[in-house]
Image: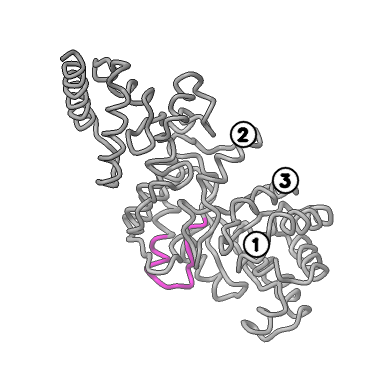
């Protein structure tokens, strides 16, 4: 929720945040990083409201590794904080003007401070993908010794590919007893692939946002990561896949970002088929031209009539209306449908298909009569 709302131009109302939090919890998400209390009173009010819902999930606040941010999180009433500190030299210099050793000292000081305040504490290694790995390992050690329960490896600028992600996460997992979280950004369109690579390498937690909302190109989309874990990796997650489409639509409306029709898993058209070859195959064997089973997501295959439709798909569409397509009429109907679809640049509705079929039947009869003369 926190990084999702950091999408340029996106701002959720309190009512929208509460509704989204409730929907995420109902869909089985185990944790919500719900906001940044240092933003001020409105954000603190929202965090307090979400925490007060008692949704049965861990509600975290994102904080910089400072006493002021921890104090703001106390006012927000959350039970857990993600204390973030730069891991790369670039950000240590640009943001904080401190050395690596000074950063580690902050971890050793402020993680126990937050624990004493009553929080569960995760440590976020910002820009970990561009950090010196030896320093990242020392940061993991410092976080573990200070009492943190998890380390976040953040690919803050989306600099990793799946191979580099796997290598980095595997090295940290091998060297640390902490639970490891991976936080991917989608600058090169690799956030989902990188998240899956992180899971393969031993990461136990993956940061996601609904629809891939987030800074710049966004974050790893919840729906893609959850579906891939379940369907490709055979992993059991807590996520109710049947709720993903409704959740994406809800968040998209609140963000004023409509869900693209071709968006993986949740788009309106992702289980739609137009190609005559594909439809004919699907009618013979539903698995012939299908990726994930749409039923897993509470959806179904949909056949669309358009420029690429063949005789078998048109016959199927007409059969759904109780109309039979004669063999001699099929070529005329296919030609009419293709011309009409090319002109309109849209799919052909059931009613329009019926009209085109009537015209084709009439033309077939006319041709027959001319031939008889």
- Which one is in front in this view, the residue at disc 3 or the one at disc 2? 3
> Mark 3 highlights which residue?
200
Q: Position of residue 265 (x, y in %)?
A: 47, 41
- Main SS class of the magenta portion in the image: helix
Which residue is found at the position 54% from the left and 64% from the top? 62
Of callouts 1 and 2, the N-terminal one: 1
Q: Position of residue 16 (x, y in %)?
A: 33, 55
Inspect the magenta stretch and tell me whether residue 136 lies in it. Answer: no
Pick the residue in front: 342 or 250: 342
Q: Is residue 29 left or right of residue 194?
A: left
> Mark 2 highlights which residue?
236
| Magenta region | 33-46
Q: Is residue 179 left or right of residue 187?
A: right
Q: Secondary structure at mark 3?
A: helix
Of callouts 3 and 2, the N-terminal one: 3
The CA distance from mark 3 to mark 1 is 31 Å
Inspect the magenta stretch and tell me whether residue 38 lies in it. Answer: yes
Which residue is found at the position 48% from the left and 72% from the top? 38
Q: Residues within 10 Å of mark 3 (few under 14, many from 20)?
A: some
Which image quarter: residue 181? bottom right
Q: Is residue 210 left or right of residue 307?
A: right
């Amino acid at each position: 929720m926190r990084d999702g709302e950091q999408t340029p131009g996106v701002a959720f109302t309190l009512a929208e945040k509460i509704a989204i939090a409730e929907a995420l919890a109902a869909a089985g998400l185990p944790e919500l990083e719900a906001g940044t209390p240092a933003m001020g009173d409105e954000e603190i009010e929202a965090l307090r409201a979400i925490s007060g819902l008692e949704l049965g999930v861990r509600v975290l606040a994102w904080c910089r590794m400072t006493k002021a941010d921890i104090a703001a999180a106390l006012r927000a009433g959350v039970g857990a904080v993600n204390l973030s500190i730069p891991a790369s030299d670039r950000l240590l210099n640009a943001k904080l003007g401190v050395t690596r050793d000074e950063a580690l000292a902050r971890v050793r000081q402020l993680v126990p401070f937050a624990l004493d305040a009553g929080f569960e504490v995760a440590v976020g290694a910002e820009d970990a993908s561009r950090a010196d790995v030896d320093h990242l390992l020392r940061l993991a050690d410092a976080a573990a010794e200070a009492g943190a329960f998890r380390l976040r490896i953040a690919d803050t600028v989306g600099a990793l590919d799946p191979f580099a992600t796997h290598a980095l996460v595997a090295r940290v997992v091998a060297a640390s007893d902490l639970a490891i979280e991976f936080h991917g950004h989608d600058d090169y369109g690799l956030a989902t692939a990188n998240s899956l690579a992180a899971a393969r390498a031993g990461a136990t937690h993956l940061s996601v946002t609904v629809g891939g909302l987030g800074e710049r190109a966004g974050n790893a989309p919840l729906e893609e990561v959850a579906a891939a874990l379940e369907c490709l990796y055979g992993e059991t997650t807590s996520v109710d896949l049947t709720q993903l489409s409704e959740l994406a639509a809800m968040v998209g409306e609140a963000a004023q970002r409509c869900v693209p029709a071709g968006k993986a898993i949740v788009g309106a058209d992702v289980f739609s088929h137009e190609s005559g070859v594909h439809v004919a195959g699907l009618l013979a064997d539903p698995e012939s031209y299908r990726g994930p089973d749409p039923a897993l997501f509470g959806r179904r295959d949909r056949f669309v009539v358009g420029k690429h439709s063949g005789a078998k798909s048109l016959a199927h569409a007409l059969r759904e209306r109780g109309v039979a397509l004669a063999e001699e009429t099929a070529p005329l109907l296919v030609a009419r449908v293709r011309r009409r679809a090319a002109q309109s640049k849209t799919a052909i509705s059931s009613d329009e298909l019926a009209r085109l079929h009537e015209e084709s039947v009439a033309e077939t009869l006319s041709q027959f009569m001319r031939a008889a003369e």
